[in-house]
């Protein structure tokens, strides 16, 4: 195999700074949900720490060069958490923060599920589930063919693991030994209308990914330091793609949203926004 | 057509380091030469077409020119959403090559029949749809597809079909139909593997004193509008011929064009498969006879329409 193993960043993650960033990100997502009265707030909050670990510690990306062929790819396969991605990209400087005000507005670039080729930093149009990993595998293989050693991170929802294409792709990535591919499953135990494991049985999810040939680990999906270190270890020398089963809480960060699936579709009122900001230590 | 595809692909692979071959676990030994020369650019993606199409899109989004290949229903309808969203939405230059157009694999049974794919694929923005008529057109289509910076669908027959063109179609161009035989009374616009039937129908019509022009209308999207304008302007009868459903196929595309175009014209008839599944056992020749797509049936219907 001709994939150059990249050097991992020596610096340990600054956990306090990452935590503060995660709180700011959550605040921004809540503002956007309120302004647009858009759904999927809880799904966006559950993966906020993954996005912060990725964009503020792990990814080799430059917001000024969003098309750099050597950049790491981050694919938000759970496209319904678009608000979290948009806020992340804006806070990283891919586009002006003010543009977040156009989220879900007529004529804007920030649709409820992310379009591609419009916004810098959005690697793929997602929303329909089960697409991000196959795309990511193709990107990783193209990197191998072209001698580019970038990594590919794909963030999947737990409900997304219902899709057959995820498992097609899991077997493919293992057969091709795509060790620079990393899946993070936002395992918040809910899908749109029911408990994940009462819908289609995911458990034991880590064992499933391991059985499919992945170097699979369970991780606290709200421990930004642990997330940053685990993602930074990719590729980890196992010769296998890496799956991080990130245990999360849907609506994480706001007491009255946590693990309450009504917030899959609900958007907060102005009063709830104030309350949420307070809980996040933002106001 | 199949062997011409593998051979031309190997040549293209030698010429262009971006060419990557993805197979859905078919074509045993067919790609041995490509694999020998470019082992790092051949992938058997298994019986997992949704993943294969997504992988192809991901590769194309990073500058490669992947070719995704398997039997028609599996490389089209099985993974239609991946084609729509991963390939076409991203304008990813993936070349989708299907083997077994229409009733080419009639004998393999209903899962392998493919009379709806043109309809699905031509409705997707950014997609080009080409139905080559013989081995030479396959080579031309593949070469032309690789020069595109956009998705292309190539709908092949199988192997061993009659070769119509006397030699390589060096001027093959997407969206430019090829006149095979000139005539005066009726124009047969044929797409894909029906061309030999159309040619035979023209011979049968000649015996009846009817002069038929035969055109290989290989590109269904975009349509060769100049050819259509010419045909509908010159002939009192124009017929489309395809091994595909009358709903949404080539004939339907021409109907749409006629509805949208202010063209004075004579009669128009369409030959294609009906809105029904073919449920019998039998090979392609038998299927065509049952579906009214054999040369003599085409000739009879045209002779009748001209009277």
Image (cartoon, coloured by chain):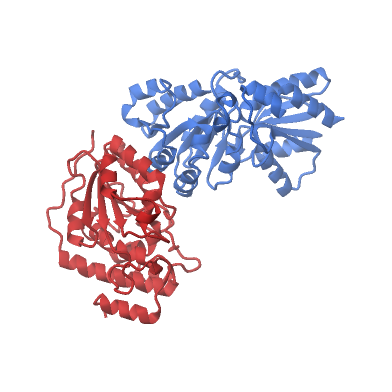
Chain colours: A red, B blue
- The residue that appears at 30% across and 61% down in the rendered structure is A47
Give the number of marks.
Answer: 0
For residue A108, above or below residue A186: below
Q: Quadrant of residue B264?
A: top right
Residue A278 pos. (x, y %): 27, 79
At 24% from the left edge and 53% from the top edge, which residue is drawn? Answer: A60
Q: In the displayed structure, does residue B115 sit left or right of residue B148? A: right
Query: x and y percent of residue B62 in the render?
Result: 36, 43
Counting from the top left corner in percent of width and height, residue A69 is at 31, 47
Give whichever of A171, B102 is nearer the camera.
A171
Could one spot residue B212 in this view of the protein?
Answer: no
State left or right for residue B307 relative to residue B289: right
Q: Which of the pair A40/B141 is nearer the observer? A: A40
Q: Which of A245 and A240 is in front in this view?
A: A245
Q: Is residue A66 at all visible to an observer of this figure?
A: yes
Image quarter hosting the C terminus of chain A = bottom left
Residue B136 position by quadrant: top right
Quadrant in which the N terminus of chain A is drawn = top left
Question: Of residues B10 and B161, which is closer to you in this image?
Answer: B161
**Point 27% across, 40% down: residue:** A211
Q: In this view, does B248 lie above or below B2?
A: below
The quarter of the picture where residue A4 lies is top left
Residue B159's place in the image compared with A105, above or below, is above
């Amino acid at each position: 195999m001709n994939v150059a193993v990249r050097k991992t960043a020596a610096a340990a993650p600054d956990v306090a700074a990452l935590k503060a960033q995660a709180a700011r990100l959550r605040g921004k997502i809540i503002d956007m949900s309120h302004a647009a009265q858009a759904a999927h707030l809880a799904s966006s909050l559950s993966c906020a720490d993954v996005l912060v670990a990725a964009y503020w510690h792990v990814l080799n990306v430059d917001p000024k060069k969003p098309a750099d062929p050597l950049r790491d790819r981050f694919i938000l396969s759970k496209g319904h958490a678009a608000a979290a991605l948009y806020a992340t990209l804006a806070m990283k400087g891919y586009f002006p923060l003010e543009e977040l005000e156009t989220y879900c507005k007529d004529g804007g670039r920030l649709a409820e599920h992310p379009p591609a080729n419009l916004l810098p930093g959005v690697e793929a149009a997602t929303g329909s589930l089960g697409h991000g990993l196959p795309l990511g595998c193709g990107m990783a293989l193209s990197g191998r063919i072209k001698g580019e050693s970038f990594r590919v991170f794909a963030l999947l929802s737990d409900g997304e693991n219902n899709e057959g294409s995820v498992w097609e792709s899991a077997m493919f990535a293992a057969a091709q030994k795509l060790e620079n591919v990393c899946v993070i499953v936002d395992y918040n135990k809910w899908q749109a209308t029911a408990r994940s494991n009462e819908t289609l049985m995911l458990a034991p999810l880590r064992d499933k990914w391991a059985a499919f040939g992945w170097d699979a680990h369970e991780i606290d999906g709200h421990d930004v330091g642990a997330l940053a270190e685990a993602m930074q270890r990719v590729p980890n020398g196992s010769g296998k793609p890496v799956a991080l089963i990130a245990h999360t809480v849907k609506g994480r960060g706001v007491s009255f949203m946590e693990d309450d699936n009504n917030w899959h579709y609900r958007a907060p009122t102005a009063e709830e926004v104030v309350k949420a900001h307070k809980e996040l230590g933002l106001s | 057509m199949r062997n011409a595809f593998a051979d031309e692909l190997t040549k293209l692979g030698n010429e262009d380091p971006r060419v990557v071959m993805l197979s859905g676990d078919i074509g045993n030994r067919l790609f041995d030469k490509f694999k020998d020369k470019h082992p790092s650019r051949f992938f058997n993606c298994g019986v997992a077409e949704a993943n294969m199409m997504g992988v192809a899109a991901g590769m194309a989004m990073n500058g490669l020119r992947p070719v995704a290949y398997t039997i028609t229903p599996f490389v089209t309808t099985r993974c239609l959403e991946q084609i729509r969203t991963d390939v076409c939405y991203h304008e990813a230059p993936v070349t989708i090559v299907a083997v077994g157009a229409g009733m080419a694999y009639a004998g393999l049974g209903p899962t392998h029949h493919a009379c709806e794919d043109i309809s699905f694929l031509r409705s997707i923005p950014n997609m080009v749809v080409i139905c080559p008529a013989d081995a030479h057109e396959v080579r031309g289509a593949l070469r032309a597809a690789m020069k595109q910076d956009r998705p292309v669908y190539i709908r092949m027959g199988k192997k061993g079909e009659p070769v119509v063109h006397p030699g390589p179609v060096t001027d093959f161009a997407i969206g430019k139909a090829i006149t095979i035989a000139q005539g005066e009374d009726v124009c047969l616009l044929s797409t894909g593997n029906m061309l030999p039937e159309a040619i035979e129908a023209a011979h049968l019509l000649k015996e009846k004193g009817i002069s038929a022009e035969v055109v290989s209308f290989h590109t269904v999207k975009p349509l060769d509008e100049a050819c259509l304008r010419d045909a509908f302007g010159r002939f009192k009868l124009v017929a489309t011929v395809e091994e595909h459903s009358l709903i949404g196929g080539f004939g339907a595309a021409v109907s749409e064009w006629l509805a949208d175009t202010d063209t004075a014209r004579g009669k128009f008839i369409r030959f294609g498969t009906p809105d029904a599944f073919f449920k019998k056992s039998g090979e392609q020749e038998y299927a065509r006879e049952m579906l009214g797509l054999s040369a003599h049936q085409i000739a009879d219907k045209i002779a009748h329409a001209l009277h």
